[in-house]
Image (cartoon, grey):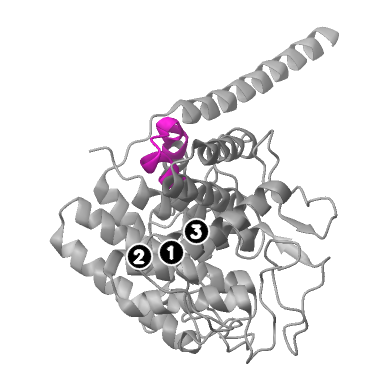
Amino acid sequence: MKSNLFLVVNLLLVLFTSSVVCRAEGLDSLSKKSFTYTNEDVWTIYEGFNNTLLDTDKYIYKTNSSFLSAKDRFNGAAAIWCQPIYWDMAMNAYKLAKRLKSKDKQATYKRLCTKIFEGNKAQYANFNFDDNNENTGWFIYDDIMWWTISLARGYELFKVDEYLTLSELSFSRVWYGSPKVGDTGSYDKENGGMFWQWQPIQNPKPNKPGDGKMACINFPTVVAALTLYNNVPRKRKESTDEYPKYQTREQYLAKGKEIYEWGVENLLDKQTGQIADSRHGNGRPAWTAHVYNQATFIGASVLIYKATGEKKYLHPAILATDYTVNVMSAKHNLLPFENGIEQGIYTAIFAQYVAMLIYDCKQTQYLPFLKRTIGYGLENRDKSRNVCSGEYEKVLPAGSTIDSYSASGIPALMLLFPADK
């Protein structure tokens, strides 16, 4: 009896060990797999994203694939601050088509860029930044500033004057506040940095010293200021208006550098490259790192480095990227996914800014890591729709509901990091 029991136990141990080894070998083989893709794959994945999540009647993006249309914030429309990220993707598609000398795709994606702008303008109060209704209007400072950035990029790419006008108006709206709304602006004249929101949204009062200054408004403000610095006319006179509609190049650079320095002193761990989520007054920073905050800090650093040529701005960009890749992405050696409303968009934002570091500053050491993330996302996509999940290590079941935030990451990466040949 003991002999038989001994044999059974040993057999079970062998089977269990074999199962563990097989699973380990399976994971190991996937981790060592060399992922390749073509530029046709880039277009396929981007079109899969659009076919699944773009409302082609309104040309704004849906919250998720379960909605037939994007009516408004509470009924199927993706968040107001994420729509410009999707517009960035369309602009990147146009730039890639131009680089690949595909005239048909250039025309297609130029039309798409125009339609996305027009659709969002119609949806969001004609870009009246003094309209602060909470459904299709503007009620948080960073929501506006994300649009400031993309509008400036749109002008840089297409030279449409309306884009630049709206970008500058929105920057001033955030910085100085609105006499129509009654808020006093995001900029803290006394202690520096940018407040996250006007208090409260209805019948606003001035922000207090202890109110929140989030990374998600401070570093996008730097990115916006430097993008405008790169695009506004060189010879401008300073406006003397209390609520100026524009800044000079020198003013944009000065404002960007000032907010950047505040962010470095208050939101950056200078030893590790971690970016805090926020700081309230003189309290301890909230040391929770999010990929999109790492991203905009990287972009802010690169843009000031390029504007000034001072290498002291390049080192922090590398430090923050190292932290994102080596610490935040350590669990799977892939860009991490955060569960929560709208947080799936973080990879798409990271793609935009790490591309600046890689291409403009020749920091190509991050390419294998990004290609690995792309490879996993492609491998585990829903192949029936060519849509990718935000959890790149997991298979997305065919036909399952997917939100536009999570689905944006892989196409955003592929548009900026296409096939090598």
Q: Residues within 10 Å of mark 3 (few under 14, many from 20)?
A: many
Name the residue nearer the viewer: 409 or 259: 259
Quarter of the figure that contains the N terminus: top right
Task: Report the residue marked by disc 2.
Answer: 234
Between discs 3 and 2, the one toward the N terminus: 2
| Tag 1–tag 3 contact (CB < 8 Å) | yes
User: For mark 3, what is the residue?
Assistant: 253
Amino acid beneath label 2 = Arg
Residue 195, percent across and down?
70, 68
At x 46% / y 82%, what residue is drawn?
A: 69
Question: Which residue is identified by label 1?
Answer: 249
Residue at the location (22% across, 68% down)?
Answer: 108
Q: Are marks 2 and 1 in contact (CB under 8 Å)?
A: yes
Asked which secondary structure carries label 3, the reply is helix
Q: Is residue 24 left or right of residue 212?
A: left
Quarter holding the C terminus is top left
Decide whether residue 367 is among the magenta residues: yes
